[in-house]
Image: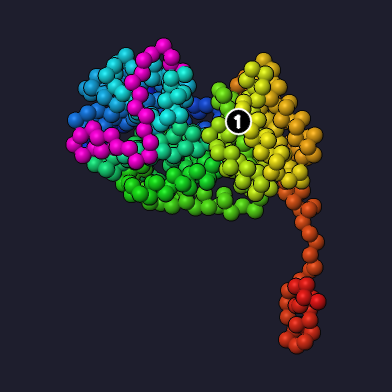
Amino acid sequence: MTVTAAARSRDVQVGEIAQKTTVFRSRTWDRLKFEAEYSRGQGTTVNTYLIQAREVALIDPPGESFTELFIDGFQQHEYYQQVEYIILTHVNANRIATLKALIPLTYRAKIVCSKPAANTLKAAIPDLELEILVVRSGDIIDIGEGHELKIFTKPTPRLPDGIMVFDPATQVLYSDKLFGAHVCGDAIFDENWKALGDDRQHYFDTIHAAQAKQVDDALDKVALCQPKILAVGHGPIARFSVSRLIMDYRDWCTNQKQKALSVVLMYTSAYGNTGMMAQAIALGLTQSGVYVESLDCEYADPVEIAAAVEQCDSFIIGSPTLGGHAPTQIQTALGLILANASKTKLAGVFGSYGWSGEAVDLLETKLVNAGYPLGFETLRVKFKPTPEALSDCTKAGENFALALKRSQKERAPKGRRRVVGRSRRSGGWWGRFVWRRWQGGI
């Protein structure tokens, strides 16, 4: 009997990707979540890496969808009790769930992460005394035998705590959310990389298009490493198309930044729900041909926010409601908008809430009273957004893009029409007269 991919159960695939370097690929052939990034329905893998040198380092345990499977598979590996470092390239609630199960098995291990990630861990697991090693760009973790792991921070609005790890001994770059694809299969590497093109671009479009500026900065750091292998967080590991994939990311970032119209998308997200809405709105905007600059106001500098809202064609702002109020960072951003953004700019408001939505009401009221036109009806979601709510957010982004294009067209000055072509008198004084008149010379 033939077992189709769709009928296969979740599992953990183990393989060697470089000298003393093992990957644990937690696999599902079904769609893992309902966000747009998984919408191609190819399944996905969540990749975890183990480097076995004089000391042992574990990089990126999977989320809670795979906690039990991963722990069972990991305990069968001879080095599981020797882990000295658990390196987290980013932290979220799903990963924390697995970390709680992993810590008793790796009781000697130090947790390595960025400062924002450390703050998240301490708040999420207050009852455990975690030994956390906070790292910054340029730090090196020497685990012996030439494996001097170099740390590069790569904060983005989606993952402000993000880092990358480069191992010069194997020339493997652990790139986390960069360069991945939601594709599940038996191939550990990208031997058939041409067939991955659409999945890789879809992954970029749904995750990175709205943070192209920050991704471009991360690519500069990737260039310093000159990796031979990109150990991605999801999908096949890049070994046969490293240069091409990096070049594609450069091109995709450039294409985003060259779009004619721009929207600044500002938000904070206390529990991830407002962030999910922001990503869905951004998808609608980018699919409609608008450049989106995402800013997480919790980490963005006020000078950066002020410059962005002054230079953009339009803006959208989103907020959770905490204790009946908007977070301080959102109140600061609102003040910067009112002080720096032209009243002719199209605006949008969205947010999630638990028991009340005062923050969203505040943003809407302040912007409308100041005279800003709204590009879509204000979006409000209670608790976690459903697939239908996220679809509404994407549609709102599309409608906002249409309204922005319409408003820009209406405001465009009506210049004199230039006749293209060559008449029999175009080389004489009449031709020069027409040219000067078209330029406003007379």
Q: Is residue 41 above or below residue 170?
A: above
The region drawn magenta spans 124-149
> In the image, is residue 142 part of the stretch drawn in magenta?
yes
Residue under numbered circle 1: 329
Residue 375 shows in the view: yes
Check the picture and name the quadrant holding the N terminus.
top left
**Is residue 168 found left or right of 336 in the rendered image?**
left
The residue shown at (76%, 82%) is 431
Secondary structure type for disc 1: helix
The x, y position of residue 302, in whole percent, is 59, 39
The x, y position of residue 346, in whole percent, is 73, 42
Nearest to the observer: residue 375 or residue 205: 375
Residue 184 shows in the view: no
Q: Is residue 268 above or below residue 240?
A: above
The residue shown at (76%, 43%) is 343
The residue shown at (68%, 39%) is 337
**Is residue 366 found left or right of 183 in the rendered image?**
right
Q: Residue furthest bottom?
A: 428
Q: Is residue 226 above or below residue 42?
A: below
Nearest to the observer: residue 6 or residue 278: 278
The x, y position of residue 84, in whole percent, is 26, 24
